[in-house]
């Protein structure tokens, strides 16, 4: 592989790894209220009584 190819590959791998690490850190350290965590198993959006008009 040419030096330009190595450079692009290294920059890409470092960039994606950094983005993944920062995203993982933000998700794991966010302090959110438990009442905001819900699942669609309880009620799916199409089962909702309230209809947006």
Image: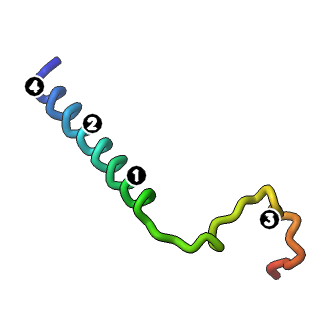
Q: Nearer the viewer, mark 3 or mark 4?
A: 3
Q: Which mark is residue 45?
A: 3
Label 1: which residue?
24
Label 4: which residue?
3
CB within 8 Å, label 3 to label 2: no
Instruction: Tell me the element at label 1.
Output: helix
Q: Position of residue 5 (x, y in %)?
A: 18, 27
Q: Which mark is residue 13?
A: 2
Q: Quadrant of residue 1?
A: top left
Q: Spatial distance from mark 4 to mark 2, Cα to Cα? A: 15 Å
Of the image marks 1 and 4, the number of the one nearer the N terminus:
4
Q: Nearer the viewer, mark 4 or mark 2?
A: 2
State the residue at coordinates (39%, 54%): 23
Instruction: Tell me the element at label 4.
Output: helix
Q: Position of residue 45 (x, y in %)?
A: 80, 65
Of the image marks 3 and 2, the number of the one nearer the N terminus:
2
């Amino acid at each position: 592989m040419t030096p330009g190819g190595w450079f692009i590959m290294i920059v890409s791998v470092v960039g994606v790894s950094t983005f993944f690490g920062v995203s993982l850190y933000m998700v794991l350290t966010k302090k959110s209220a438990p009442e905001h965590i819900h699942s669609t198993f309880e009620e799916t959006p199409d089962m909702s009584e309230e209809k947006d008009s």
